[in-house]
Each structure stands twice: as C-alpha cells, then as structure tokens.
Amino acid sequence: MKKVGLIINPVAGMGGKVGLKGTDGPKVVEKARSMGARPESADKATLALQPLSAIKEEITIVTCPGEMGEDTARRCGFEPELVSGIGDPSTEEDTEKAAKEMLERGVDLLLFVGGDGTARNIYNAIGDDSPVPALGIPAGVKIHSAVYATNPRNAGELAVQFLKDAGLPVRRSEVMDIDEDAFREGRLSARLYGYLQVPCSGELMQHLKVGGAETEESVLEAIAENVVEKMEENVVYIVGPGSTIGPIMTKLGLSNTLLGVDVVKNGQLLASDVNEKQLLELIEGEKAKIIVTVIGGQGYIFGRGNQQISAQVIRKAGKDNIIVVATREKIFSLEYERLLVDTGDEEVNRMLCGYLRIVTGYNEELMYRVTC
C-alpha cells in the first residue's frame, strides 16, 4: 500500500482574479476576500485527485484536517489519515510542519496545492536532498517554479504514473519565488530558493519560467505596429501583462500596467490594472478581444499571472477574438511545440485547444498548437 501526502493551501490563487497578483500574507488574503475573491485551491485539488480515485484501493492519503486536505479527500471518496497540530486558520508554519510529519510517516509522494509561496514552504520543510519526491498541483497566481504539473488533472495523472511505475524518473527542479510587494508595483524580482525532487514525465510537467521577452526593439515594435494597425473601432481590447505587450500600449500613446491588465477602446484607456469583476462589467454587451503573450520557457497563454482574464471573460470574448503575440525566439525556445492553458474551467480549456495564430512581427504569423 503506497502512501500519498496531500497539503492544500486554502487561499492559493485567491488574489488572481481580483488583480492582487498573489496572496502571500494575511492582509492580502483579507483584502482579496473583501473584493469578492473565493477559494479555488480545493477545486484544483479535486481535479488532481480524480485520476487517483482509480487506484484508491492501492493508496492511503495522509493529509491535514479540514480545508488543508481532509475535506477534499473525503469528497473524492478517500478515508485519509490525518496529521496533528494544524491551526485554523492554517499558516505557512502549519504547511511546513505537516510536510515534515508526512515524511516521518513514510509517504511515497508528497502532493501540494498552491503557488510559488507554497513550493517554498515545502522546500523549507523537506530540503534539496529529500528521498521523497514532491509534486505541485498548480493553484497560485504566480507559478515560476518548475515543480508543478502543467495543470491539476495532469498532476493527478503523473502521480498515478509515478505510484504504479517504480522506474519513472525523478529530477531536481527549481523552486522560485518573487517579491509580491515589488510585483504589485510593476517590478519583477525573482530568486532561486532551492530544488525539489519531482517525478518527470515529458509534457505533464511545466518548465521554469524564463524571465524577459526578446528585447530587440525592432521586433517588438513590428508586433505592436501590426496589432495597432488592425484594431477595430468600437471593440473593447483587454490588454494582458508582459513586456512583449507593453509596446502596443506605447504605440497607442497610453500608459501600461506591465504586470496587470488594462482595457482600451477606440484608442482610449478605459481602465488600468483591472480585476475579473471589472473586466466582466466593461465587456458586458460589447464585442471584446483579448491580447496576451506567451510565458517564456513554459508556453502558457492563460492561467499564469493573468487570472484576471478568467474563464468567464474568455468565454464571453470567444476563441476567435484572442490575439496572441510573441517573438519567434520565444516560441522556438519552447521545449515542446505547444502552448498551454490552465483557466480552471475544463470546458474553456477544451475550447481553446487546437491551433491559434501568433503575431510574431509585422504581417508575420505562426500557427501553433494549444493543449490543456
């Protein structure tokens, strides 16, 4: 009988749709709640546990009481073992304490649900040289670390592969995190904290985020020229984050929220650094288009750092009204020849699958496959 540790960060990702760019710290969590944010990490954990349900007679889930794991495990049909001494509400210290106890109980795999902050907590608890592999189920706003699966369901599929195949390799993968206060001010400051051993299985694992888009001014200028020239009158444009997109706003003569989402119509700035609720209000009854770029090294276009552009927003705009921009260098540097989406809504993920055009220059485009 294999043992699987499960730790859920109950507040992971709550800041995304309301535009807070993270939920590190109780004050930020409280602000997110006051803005209407709701917890989503339990839903992500449920998606990951569904593949594991097929082998539930062969595994025991070791988890934390209540919303840190027990509630979700029981909803998915498991009868878990519980670690002790976890507070309510839980803290980062509780996450680290739980991880250490799970190692002492001899788990074969440690699953954790969250973002980069949660990955840091797991790393603090078990360190670089732990004999027990860990695997992240993505639920955070910012996920730069390479210890996460591409989406929650793939985390479950990979966990099943690992538990059933003793020969599945593991690799040391990076735990990264950024300064959230600096991030909210439009400055990206990331650092490497260490490494975790993670199961390795091709396209099921995401890669380390590569900082910085192609900086050749002429390439970005050409992309911006192409997009602005083709903008339509009386259409609301949702302009996502990223340095590749910044020149588009510059070309329009508008200020740009580098790490947030802005809204433009008829060459005028309607709103800056908006959240999901504001987006839905701004596009109600309007034709809307979404401009996003590709995360370097990972290939995500939705679900990493732009959760304000939620599944509901994407559904209202429609797949045909998504404009993806990226340099050829960024696209060709992706290890696997595909883009990724992780909107939290499997129906919308499936809608986005297939092929999308990517604007790579002036009147230059690539067709690229999207998977979920």
Image: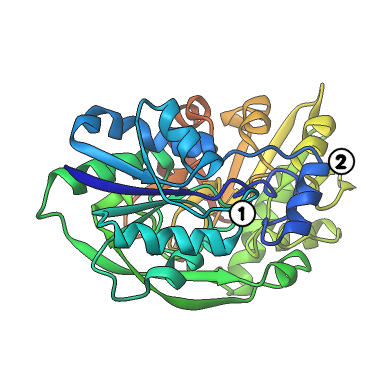
- State the image coordinates of residue 28 (x, y, percent, origin top left): 76, 56
* Circle nearer the N terminus (2, 1): 2
Dot label at residue 305: 1
- CA neighbours of label 2 inside 10 A, class few (<14), some (14 to 19), many (20+): some
Residue that carries the numbered disc 2 in the rendered image = 266
Which residue is at the front of the view, 230 or 57? 57
Quadrant for the C terminus in the image: top left
Q: Does 327 appear above or below 310? A: below
* Residue 257, image x, y percentages: 78, 60
Compared with 294, 288 (above or below) is above
Amino acid carrying mark 1 in the image: Gly
Task: Name the kind of residue labelled 2 in the image.
Answer: Asn
Residue in the image at 11% along x and 52% along y: 166
Q: Is residue 245 above or below residue 33?
A: below
In-front residue for pair 138/336: 138
Q: Nearer the viewer, mark 2 or mark 1?
A: 1
Q: Determine the secondary structure under disc 2.
A: loop
**Residue in the image at 31% along x and 61% along y:** 103
Position of 130 with respect to 126 (left or right) is left
| C-alpha span from label 2 to label 1 | 26 Å
Is 33 left or right of 148, judged from the image as shown? right
Q: The N terminus appears in which quarter of the rendering?
A: top left
**Which of the numbered marks, if any, corresponds to residue 114?**
none
Tell me which residue sits at (15%, 54%) in the image: 168
